[in-house]
Image (cartoon, rainbow, N blue to C red):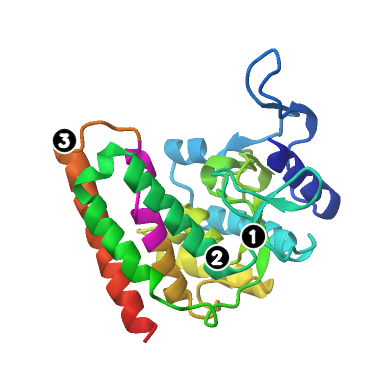
Amino acid sequence: TEAEVQALELLTKYTTIPVPKVLAYSSDRNNEYGVEWILMARLPGKNMSIVCKVQELSFNAKKSIMRDLADYVAQMHFRIPRFNRIGAFRIDGEIGTDLNQLGPWSTYEQFVRDRVQADAITLNKDPVFAPIKDSMLDAIHQFDKLRFSSLINLPFVFSHGDLDIQNILISTDDLESPRITGIVDWEWAGSFPCSEEYFTSYQYFLQDDNNDNVRIFFFEELEKRNVLTPRTIERFSLLEKFNRLVTNIALWDLTDLINSAHPLVKKKLDNSLSTVQAVILELEDELK
């Protein structure tokens, strides 16, 4: 809760991004409701994910939205003062742990290795991973031998952490040229390597199977504003491999499941192990 409140405060202070106004909040779970909460003012517009379910937006409509989005991403990157650490925002203005209670980190290497070790702990304690645990831990041991600290030099920028159409509000009075009227759900916001948002955000614009031009246009709009993209981030293919590694060791959607022998669960476990083993081989080859 405090991380989201602080993120919204920074956004309001330094940018023109349409974000909810915080009216009141509590980060104490011992309150009368038993949960943390934030009361915010309502923003105009409709949720973009709901609009897209009703009708397919034209390329011109998507371009209008992407121009706005690129403007707002640039504001996050360049107007908000940068931090020299990776992590979520604390109410005192410093960088603290993320929602998984990991961090903060001073380097990209720490950022990757700590998450791998956290996944190793999950492998050991969650029985659903028992069928692949030993093989996965062997793969992690191989990863631990790799050295890459001198290869990665990324700026840490203000990132939303989950900036996709489910968290974007748009105007609907003219669906040929809609505008972004609000961006919501800032609980994952923080100071992160600039590469991370291409793994956690923008998926609607990056994975348009019907139109490669959407992704190209989005990158062009970002690059016009000096925002680094997968086309301009140094060694992005290496960073993508690290992301595939971290996100496949202990699949979050399988945690707390009981029956690892269920065919669907078994298939996901086998696929995740195969992915991690393949990525380790790719990393060993690239980091020679």
Mark 1 or mark 3: whose residue is earlier in sequence: 1
Q: CA distance from mark 1 to mark 2?
A: 9 Å
Front label number (1 vs 2): 2
Q: Residue at x 31, y 76 (%)?
A: 282
Q: Position of residue 222 (x, y in %)?
A: 62, 68
Q: Are marks 1 and 2 in contact (CB under 8 Å)?
A: yes
Classified by dominant secondary structure, the portion drawn in magenta counts as helix
Front residue of 46/132: it is 132
Question: Which type of secondary structure does the marked residue at label 1 adopt?
Answer: loop
- Among the 4 quarters of the image, the one containing residue 276: bottom left
Q: Position of residue 225 (x, y in %)?
A: 69, 71
For mark 1, does the 10 Å Cα neighbourhood hold few (<14), some (14 to 19), or many (20 or more) residues?
Answer: many
Q: Given the image, on which type of amino acid does mark 2 rest? A: Gln
Provide the residue designation for mark 2.
110
Mark 2 or mark 3: whose residue is earlier in sequence: 2
Q: CA distance from mark 1 to mark 3?
A: 38 Å
Q: Which residues are magenta?
A: 245-255
Question: Which type of secondary structure does the marked residue at label 2 adopt?
Answer: helix
Question: Is the N terminus in the top left, top right, bottom left or bottom right quadrant?
Answer: top right
Mark 1 or mark 2: whose residue is earlier in sequence: 1
- Among the 4 quarters of the image, the one containing residue 80: bottom right
Tell me the number on the disc at residue 262: 3
